[in-house]
Amino acid sequence: MRFWLIALLLLCGLGMANWWQHRPAHAASGMLAASAPAQTDIDGHPAELHSGRFTLDPRANFDITARVLSREDYQMDDLAPISPTDLTLGWGRMSDTAVLDRIRISQSNRFYFWYTDDFPIPRREIEESSANMHMIPASNAVARALRAVRQGEIVHLRGFLVNVHRDDGRAWNTSLTRDDTGAGACEVVLVEDIGETQAN
């Protein structure tokens, strides 16, 4: 009986610690990340990158400053060994608290879902100014920084959009545009640098 009580207390403590680490930040009002992500072609023919069972094929340079609308961590799915975290990011008016207060956002199974009863901005603007992105940390330092990212913060990420191939033939291709939706619309981002986050 005592063992189960100790185990329960430990689980509760771990749960509280995880909640505290990822508790939502209280972002300021207004549009906090005005610019759309910057994507540029890669000069020449970039070499493939290898990480364990995975091969990464860089497709474009990628630079984004955005508000974190939601985050979801993964441990058990096929992509988790290389991409343990998805961030749903918003820019333009999808970084504005007044807009986001009228939109419900969630993540599940590597997808991002939004709902609203009364559109604060046009549907197409919501779709083109937010995205679910699979994060691949390029270093241990970036991995630590990604683990600390909280909903509501403003983050600056720099790296590459990449296609991912596993040695058993499975593949995950990145989106190369911000105006797609549905399956295949997520960006796969090899994060080389993550800037300081901001929150109030």
Image (cartoon, helix red, strand yellow):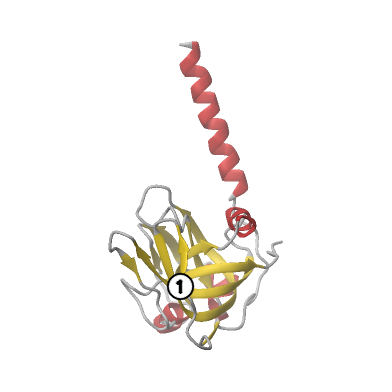
Q: Determine the residue located farthest toward the top in the rendered image.
A: 1
Above or below, comparing residue 9 to residue 3 in the picture: below
**Position of residue 176 in the picture relative to residue 194 (left or right):** left
**Position of residue 86 in the picture relative to residue 35 (left or right):** left
| Quadrant of the image occupied by residue 91 | bottom right
* Image location of residue 53, percent across then percent down: 39, 57
User: Where's the C terminus, which quadrant?
Assistant: bottom right
Above or below, comparing residue 54 to residue 6 in the picture: below
Above or below, comparing residue 91 to residue 108 in the picture: below
Identity of the residue drawn at 50% across and 63% down: 136
* Image location of residue 22, percent across then percent down: 58, 50
Q: Mark 1 is on which residue type? A: Glu
* Image location of residue 11, percent across then percent down: 51, 30
* Image location of residue 41, percent across then percent down: 51, 88
- For label 1, the residue is 48
| Quadrant of the image occupied by residue 34 | bottom right
Identity of the residue drawn at 64% across and 75% down: 32
**Position of residue 181 in the picture relative to residue 13 (left or right):** left
Q: Determine the residue located farthest toward the left in the rendered image.
A: 169
Q: Nearer the viewer, residue 175 or 16?
A: 175
Which SS class for mark 1? loop
User: Where's the N terminus, which quadrant?
Assistant: top left
Q: How many marks?
A: 1
Bin the neighbour count of mark 1 within 10 Å (Cα to Cα): few under 14, some 14-19, many 20 and up: few
Identity of the residue drawn at 53% across and 65% down: 69
Q: Nearer the viewer, residue 94 or 116?
A: 94
